[in-house]
Image (spheres, rainbow, N blue to C red):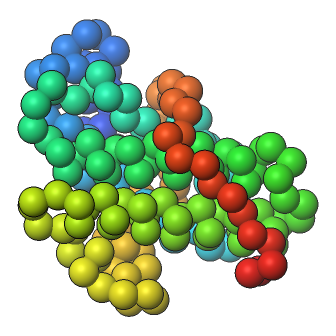
Amino acid sequence: MFWKSTLVTTLILHLISLGVGEKFNPVVLLESNFPPARPSVYNIKAICLYGNGRPRYPDSSFPSSSYAYARRAGKAANRLEAWFSRCCNRGLVHGNGQVLCCAKQAWETALSNFCIEEYSTMTLAHECCEKQQEERWNCFQIKAANPNYQPLSGYRAPIISPDMIFTWDPNTC
């Protein structure tokens, strides 16, 4: 199943690079990458090593109208990848346990903000957003499309600055 979603994502990203980004369905691209998995001891190495190999979703990749859910999910994925980068590479934390703690906080913060944005619209919110606390996080984890955070072969992510600031609190570790 994973290889199918990776193949579809690779094909779509190739089409985008050829300038046909307006002709794809962004929801299909996100299905193979959203929601992101909860950081754990099993995937933190891949989170940190392969960050540039996982998709980003610039606004230009979406049609000018509709696809509001896909835009919100793409924004959440972009934020999370930028924040993961801070946890892994920017000297924000020291030690593997601290990196994992930072990544978990980034994940929860990104998905919390995604849920807030989901509820700010007139559409139905993502089903995991309807849950609270640990039940919400478990829901996102179960639905994770790429739990091992594997990169897309041959893909190099564009740099997209996060539209929100993430502040890691080491006292919660």
Image quadrant in which the N terminus is located: bottom left
Residue 163 pos. (x, y %) = 49, 40
In the rendered image, is residue 80 in sight?
yes
Residue at the spot x=75%, y=51% of the render? 88
Residue at the spot x=23%, y=66% of the render? 119
In the rendered image, is residue 4 in sight?
no
Nearer to us in this view, 60 or 42: 60
Asked if residue 98 lies left or right of residue 8, the reply is right
Nearer to us in this view, 15 or 87: 87
Residue 84 pos. (x, y %) = 63, 52
Image quadrant in which the C terminus is located: bottom right
Asked if residue 75 lies left or right of residue 65, the reply is right
Residue 138 occupies quadrant = bottom left
Q: How many marks?
A: 0
Nearer to us in this view, 89 or 122: 122
Look at the picture and state if 22 lies above or below 74.
above
Residue 23 occupies quadrant = top left
Residue at the spot x=81%, y=78% of the render? 171
Residue 149 pos. (x, y %) = 52, 55
Residue that extends furthest to the top in the rendered view of this protein = 18
Residue at the spot x=20%, y=51% of the render? 69
Residue 97 pos. (x, y %) = 81, 72
